[in-house]
Every structure is written in C-alpha cells, then in structure tokens.
Image (spheres, grey):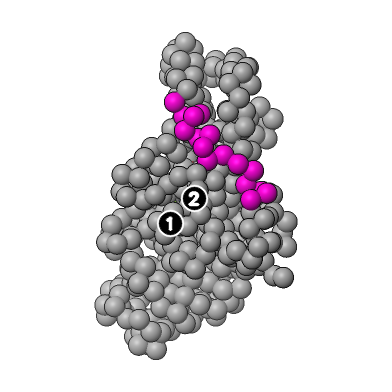
Amino acid sequence: MKPNTIAIIGTQWGDEGKGKVVHFLSRNADYIVRYQGGNNAGHTVVFNGKEHILHLVPSGILENKKCVISNGVVIDPEALYQEVMFLRSQGIKINKENLFISEQAHIILPYHKYLDAIKEKTQRIGTTQKGIGPCYADKYARVGIRVCDYLEEDTFRSLVEKNIEEKYPLISEFISKKALLKQIFEQHKKYSKFIKQFVTNTTNLLIKVINENKKVIFESAQGTLLDVEFGSYPYVTSSHPTVGGISIGTGLPPSYISKVIGVAKAYTTRVGEGPFPTEIKSKLQDILREQGKEYGATTGRPRRCGWFDSIVVKHAIKINGIKELVLTKLDCLRNIHPLKICVAYKYKNKIYYDFPTSRKLQWLVKPIYKTFPGFSEDINSISNYQSLPKNVKNYIEAIEHFCGVKIKMISLGRDRNETIFK
Ligand code: IMO
Ligand code: MG
C-alpha cells in the first residue's frame, strides 16, 4: 500500500505561500505535520475573510484537522502558548485531540534569544531573532533540552544550570544571571503544565495513522534556499526545509513520503541578508513589494523583491524530487511590463545553470533574463486556466519550460477560492 502522504516544500527563500496551499489541501487530509523550523515561520492564511498568521501550529488547524509538531521542530513554549491562546480567542478549537507535540522536539529558552541577538551583531544573517539557530546549535552540541526533559522538573533544572554556566558570560550585557534564571523557571512553571497535555510520541502516532491509510500532509517552513545544507549558506536558517528533513524531522522512513509538491512564487523574495541574484535594483522593487504585500509575517520587515529565478527553483526541484509545482501570487505581477525570468547566471564569461555553492559566486553572478510581455487585466476572479489572458499563460508556460516541471495549481489571490487547476 502506498502511503497517502504529500510533502509541501518551499522552492525559494521562504514566503512562497505554503500556508495557503497547505490550508487548501488540508480539506481532504487527516493530519498536517510541521517537521522543522520553529516560530521563525509566518504562514499567512485568509480564512472566512479573516487573516490568520500561524507560526508554530500547522495551517491545518484552521480546518479542524489533526496537527502534529514533530521532533524536528524547535519549540518556544511561550510563543506556543501565546499562539494557541490567540487562535482559541479566534474561535479555533485546539486541544489534546487535535494537537500533538513530540516529546523529542527541542525547547527554545530565553538564553537562545539573547544568543541570537549577540551572534547577529557580528554575523549579520538578518535572523528572525527567535533563538532558532542557537537552539539547533545546542541540539547538535548535545546540550539541548527536549520536551521530555522540560517535563521532568529535576532534569530540566540541572540542564538549565549547566547551560547557564557556559552561556551566561556571553549574554551578561542583557540581563543579570539571577533575573535570567527567575525568568526561565517562572516560564517553566507556567508552560510545562500547558505543553504536557499535547505531548506524545509523534513518530509512533504518524506511523500508525499512515499505516491506516490516513492522509498526511507535511508542511515545510522556510524554503529550499534557506536549508542549512542546500541553501545559500551561510545565509540560511538552521534546519532542513527540504524533503530530506521530513525523515529526520519525524522519524518516518523516506518510503513514507509519496508525493512532493513544490510551492513557487511567480517572482522571488527574500528577507534578511544574503545573496539574491535576481533582486530588482530599481523603484520597481517597491512597486512589486506593495502589490504583493511583501512584508515579513513574523518580523514585519520589508521583503527584498526580484524576478523569478529558474536556477533557484530548478535547484529546489532537483534536491526535493519535485514532480509538480504550485505557482502563487501571479496576480501581484499585474501592470508590470515587461516581466523577466532568469534562465542562467553569468560570471566572467562563464555561464552557470546550477545554483553555485561558492559564496563568492552567489554574490557575483549576474542573471541572464528572458523577457515576456506583462498583463494589465484583473485575473483574480478567473477560475479556469483557459480563461487567463494570453500573456499570463505564456508566462506560466515559460516557467514550466525553464524549470522542467508542470504547474498543476495556480494560486491567485489570498483567499483559498482564488485558485486555478491546470
Ligand atoms: P516561512 O515559513 C522567510 C530567514 C530569516 C533569515 C534566515 C535565518 O514564513 O517561509 P532564522 O531566524 O531562521 O535563524 O533566520 O532565515 N527566515 C525566513 N524567511 N520566511 C521564513 O519562514 C523564514 N524563516 C527564517 O529572515 O534570513
Ligand atoms: Mg515568512
């Protein structure tokens, strides 16, 4: 029996519109799983005319689906508590029957956020300052604190005390040691009881439900170019948004991932520092940002905007084994003439068709563009592919041509109904 599972993967630098796609597909799903990242993610979903921004809780919660935060995620207990309380205040039901949290996930503590701020002074990645990198660093340095450790008071205390000894000298400019410990233990008292109700062995749960042929969606956060292994290193996040992250991030064997769908925005954005070959360097960048409402859902920062980069998306297609794409936010390109698609990079008379590994090359390559006529029509209310204006179809088909995979779904506006199947 083929497992009834789909992975939804970001093919650019995050913010591709994964939340809307997952929300759309979750109507027919049983379980939605977040397998990496943390509350650095910001998944905006418009539902019943209301905008919801999800950070840690999978987008399927809006459809009252069963949601899993698996072992590969890093959890800030305070952020989780606030998100759950906020969603509940919006009338969304969250309880131990529909939210399952791995006992193995690592916990973000206040010192991780201070360390993130300290690192940023010298490293300048433009992180979300949520403590994500320092928390994953602790995991790999084998000093991390997992949910199961958090729930054992004595284990938690002794791990915190050991960690503080090592980390406090680095962050002493922010807070006194006494105040930091007080903050950590007060939070622990409040949130450990809250988290406990949701905690389980999510690997066992997922294997069981997949074997029962339940439909499971894996919702990635961030995108392939932010993957710590396959992204624009070092300007990346500290986890694996790529499909390989699912296996390690859930405990499911790779054979349990049946289908991989890539999500690509009709243009490119990135938040934070780092190379961005197709970044638009004129006033057009601001126009595109306004049309696409390209402001960070987590930090509110203006996103850098640029042309569609087929080198980036092809890299994601290759690494993730993507067989079909969802193209999002096409409507935001309205009235931009002409449109451009990057089809190769050039540096010193050499042409590159692969995303370069060298950080120097990533900064220095110049994009080679193909130009396409734009469109001025309002396409948001169009519901079938054939009715789209000719120039829009040409642009879509050019993306398919240069990326080498079919686009199966085209998402226009922010509302779930504004979606076309091709
Ligand atoms: P979603 O899921 C866009 C970026 C940050 C920074 C880098 C490292 O909404 O697509 P981190 O705080 O993770 O250590 O920051 O990664 N970044 C994102 N950019 N969308 C996201 O998530 C992001 N999560 C992290 O801006 O450049
Ligand atoms: Mg985001």
Q: Nearer the viewer, residue 26 or 396?
A: 26
Of the two numbered discs 1 and 2 on the same chain, state the one appearing first in sequence.
1
The secondary structure type at the circle numbered 2 is: loop
Quarter-of-image position of residue 210: bottom right
Mark yes or no: residue 207 visible: yes
Residue 322 pos. (x, y %): 61, 69
Residue at numbered disc 2: 98
Residue 310 pos. (x, y %): 53, 69
Q: Is residue 18 above or below residue 399?
A: above
Res. 230 mark: none
In three-dimensional space, the C-alpha distance between marks 1 and 2, rounded to whole angstroms, equals 7 Å
Q: Is residue 36 magenta?
A: no
Taking the spot 58% from the left edge, 64% from the top edge, the residue there is 215
Residue at numbered disc 1: 64
Left or right, residue 195 beside residue 106: left
Q: Nearer the viewer, residue 299 or 219?
A: 219
Left or right, residue 382 beside residue 204: left
Q: Nearer the viewer, residue 180 or 310?
A: 180
Please, what is the three-letter code of the amino acid marked with disc 2?
Answer: Asn
Taking the spot 32% from the left edge, 81% from the top edge, the residue there is 382
Quarter-of-image position of residue 17: bottom left
From the image, which quarter does the N terminus lie in?
bottom right
Residue neighbourhood size for the residue with mark 2, other residues' Cα within 10 Å, grouped as few (<14), some (14–19), many (≥20):
some
Please, what is the three-letter code of the amino acid marked with disc 1?
Answer: Asn
Q: Is residue 199 magenta?
A: yes
Q: Is residue 121 above or below residue 271?
A: above
Residues under numbered marks 1 and 2 in contact, where contact means CB atoms less than 8 Å apart: yes
Magenta part of the chain? 190-205
Residue 127 pos. (x, y %): 47, 40
Mark yes or no: residue 304 visible: no
Q: Nearer the viewer, residue 19 or 404?
A: 19
